[in-house]
Image (cartoon, helix red, strand yellow):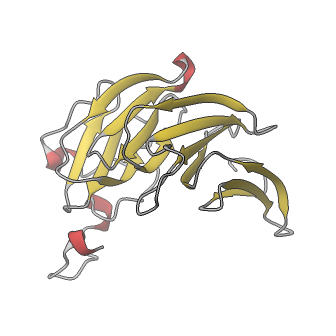
Amino acid sequence: HPSKGEYITVGDDQTLRIWDVATRTMIRMAKLDSVCRVVDYSPDGTLILVVLGGEDVPDPFNKNGSFVILNEGDLSLLHEARDTILPILDGKFSPDGQTLALAGADKTIYLYAPEEEFEIIARCRRHDAPVEHIDFSDDGEWLQSNCREGELLFFNTDKGASQSDISAMKDIPWYTQNCTLGWPVRGIHPAAYDARKC
């Protein structure tokens, strides 16, 4: 959590659990409609993103590609949407909370506007394989992303436009570094490294 001594987990047991960091005990739990493998707090800690479904798991609940937004205070449902039938592999709020990004197995990154009832802003579609990792820049204006084929791509979060000049992005400060490929991690992989095997 951005301001409390708590953290959150989701899993194949179809539960969301909030834990106390100091005591390592569960504080609250909510039962969900499906297995879940992606979760994130909004920057102010008032919202929780939960992605339903998951890869390599039968989807008897038909929830792959769905996401829900919960109220952090009482875990009540605020919003639910689905723009793909394939699993979502990563999801994050931007540092300022103005954008929500979901990375899909359908090779697409979906951008939403939380303040506009999660209206879709853009679909970023340049990857050649499922998108596994995304990161926002510190100012929330850019996304970097990696897919299974080892591509590193950059998108503007305003309209989802791709940045073709990769070298222009080398000095951009990133809010997180979950992408396994990128300027900040250049040189850490062995010469024979194959991103497709990670």
Q: Is residue 110 left or right of residue 188?
A: right
Q: In the picture shown, does residue 113 fall above or below 16? A: above
Q: Is residue 37 left or right of residue 146?
A: right
Q: In the picture shown, does residue 133 fall above or below 32? A: below
Outermost residue toward the top in this view: 116
Q: Residue 181, image x and y in percent? A: 28, 63
Q: How many marks?
A: 0
Q: Residue 106, image x and y in percent? A: 28, 45
Q: Residue at x 80, y 37 (%)?
A: 73
Q: In the picture shown, does residue 74 fall above or below 132? A: above
Q: Residue at x 35, y 31 (%)?
A: 157
Outermost residue toward the front in this view: 60
Q: Quadrant of the C terminus?
A: bottom left
Q: Residue at x 30, y 31 (%)?
A: 123
Q: Residue 91, image x and y in percent? A: 47, 46
Q: In the picture shown, does residue 36 fall above or below 23? A: above
Q: Nearer the viewer, residue 76 or 163?
A: 76
Q: Is residue 192 left or right of residue 158?
A: left
Q: Residue 161, image x and y in percent? A: 22, 30
Q: Nearer the viewer, residue 129 or 85?
A: 85
Q: Is residue 91 left or right of residue 29?
A: left
